């Protein structure tokens, strides 16, 4: 596979590291956060804005693109980069989480998953090989195998079954990828295990043994509390090879990012900044602001006085509050832009602290002074 990973700097007091993922499409500095463009676009954002915020990689979802417009259509119009109008790195999630969230409309066995489309009720069956076929057609740079994601309250026997099946599907996916995968693509391995440390370690060791060039941890932030999650991660991350990128799937509130960067995680994605923007919330250095609240009606301050993004340089809280109370899409666009700028600045600050060998101090100061309530 084509991906290479180089560690450029590492914090001596924590597990945090500054790295570089090298791919045919370009080099990407880690740790990085991926905005989520589930259906082929990051809602309320233009692709040209991503570079300004420091986002070189974005995420889309193979499950949704398979259902609509269809992976063959994306392939035939020139692949996902042309389809999305983005020339940076693109990661496609397999859609395993989305499939397993359809608990009333799917049947699972070792061959794959049968489910009903949430769009029109049509029946579909996807196997591990089919998921690789879909993502090969899409042409993303980083692709994910089909995995089984149990809920945080699943009984241990059910999680054991998910771990076994995830390993089986990972092996089949790897074989299929070696047969048909694109030359520019790299396939991640995903470890599961729920809230059970022994199953987490079992799953991770099995995925490592298969020889994936990059490793992902799935099934976090699905209902367990943060302390429980951090305790599990502190045990399993040291078991991950240092020479491979580490991706914590679906997790991405600012405090979560800083704490898990300190444990050694390199890649993140989360819908939080864009979803919060579309629901009238701003993420700021002083906390989350609900811009529909009456207190902002005459507030002439920027969303965040510590932010220099275009929105904070140009608009007042009063204007954005006015727009959101009318459900004016312009207000939601401005909030989404700012929230992603906040994330971009955070990731750039983390990388800068690592490069300058002062991450431990940055980490302590963040937890003490800047940890954002409400997000």
Image (tube, rainbow, N blue to C red):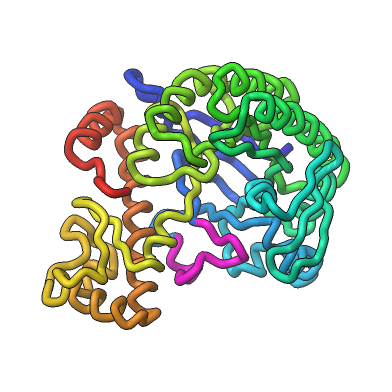
Q: How many labels does the image show?
A: 0
Q: Is residue 32 left or right of residue 87?
A: left
Figure check: 168 above or below 115: above
**Range drawn in magenta:** 36-50
Residue 118 colored in magenta in the image:
no
Of residues 104 and 308, the one nearer the viewer is 104
Do we see residue 9 in this rendering? no
User: Toward which corner of the image does residue 364 lie, by quadrant?
Assistant: top left
Name the residue rendered at 41%, 23% in the picture. 15
Residue 42 colored in magenta in the image:
yes
Name the residue rendered at 12%, 72% in the picture. 299
The quarter in which the N terminus is drawn is top right
Of residues 314 and 222, the one nearer the viewer is 222
Task: Please state the horizontal and vertical placement of residue 236, each as a whole percent of the image.
Answer: 52, 21
Figure check: 369 above or below 155: below
Q: Is residue 176 left or right of residue 237?
A: right
User: Toward which corner of the image does residue 334 lie, by quadrant?
Assistant: bottom left
Name the residue rendered at 79%, 35% in the picture. 169
């Amino acid at each position: 596979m084509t991906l290479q990973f180089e560690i450029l700097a590492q914090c001596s007091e924590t597990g945090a590291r500054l790295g570089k993922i090298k791919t045919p499409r370009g080099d990407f500095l880690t740790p990085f956060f991926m905005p989520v463009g589930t259906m082929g676009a990051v809602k309320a954002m233009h692709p040209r804005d991503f570079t300004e915020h420091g986002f070189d990689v974005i995420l889309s979802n193979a499950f949704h693109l398979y259902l609509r417009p269809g992976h063959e259509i994306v392939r035939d119009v020139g692949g996902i980069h042309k389809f999305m109008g983005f020339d940076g790195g693109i990661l496609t999630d397999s859609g395993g989480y989305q499939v397993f969230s359809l608990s009333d409309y799917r049947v699972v066995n070792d061959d794959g998953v049968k489910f009903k489309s949430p769009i029109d009720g049509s029946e579909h069956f996807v196997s591990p090989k089919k998921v690789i076929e879909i993502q090969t057609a899409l042409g993303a740079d980083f692709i994910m195998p089909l995995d089984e994601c149990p809920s945080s309250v699943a009984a241990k026997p059910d999680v054991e079954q998910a771990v076994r099946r995830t390993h089986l599907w990972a092996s089949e996916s790897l074989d299929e990828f070696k047969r048909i995968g694109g030359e520019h693509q790299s396939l991640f391995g995903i470890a599961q295990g729920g809230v059970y440390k022994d199953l987490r370690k079992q799953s991770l060791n099995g995925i490592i043994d298969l020889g994936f060039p990059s490793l992902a941890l799935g099934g976090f932030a699905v209902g367990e509390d943060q302390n429980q999650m951090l305790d599990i991660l502190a045990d399993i991350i040291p078991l991950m090879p240092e020479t491979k990128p580490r991706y914590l799937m679906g997790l991405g509130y600012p405090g979560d990012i800083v704490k898990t960067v300190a444990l050694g995680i390199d890649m993140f994605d989360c819908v939080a900044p864009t979803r919060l923007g579309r629901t009238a919330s701003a993420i700021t250095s002083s906390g989350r602001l609900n811009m529909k609240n009456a207190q902002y009606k005459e507030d002439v301050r920027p969303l965040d006085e510590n932010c220099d993004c275009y929105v904070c340089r140009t608009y007042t809280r009063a204007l954005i509050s006015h727009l959101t109370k009318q459900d004016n899409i312009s207000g939601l666009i401005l909030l989404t832009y700012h929230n992603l700028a906040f994330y971009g600045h955070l990731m750039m600050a983390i990388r800068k602290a690592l490069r300058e060998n002062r991450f431990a101090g940055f980490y302590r100061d963040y937890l003490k002074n800047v940890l954002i309530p409400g997000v």
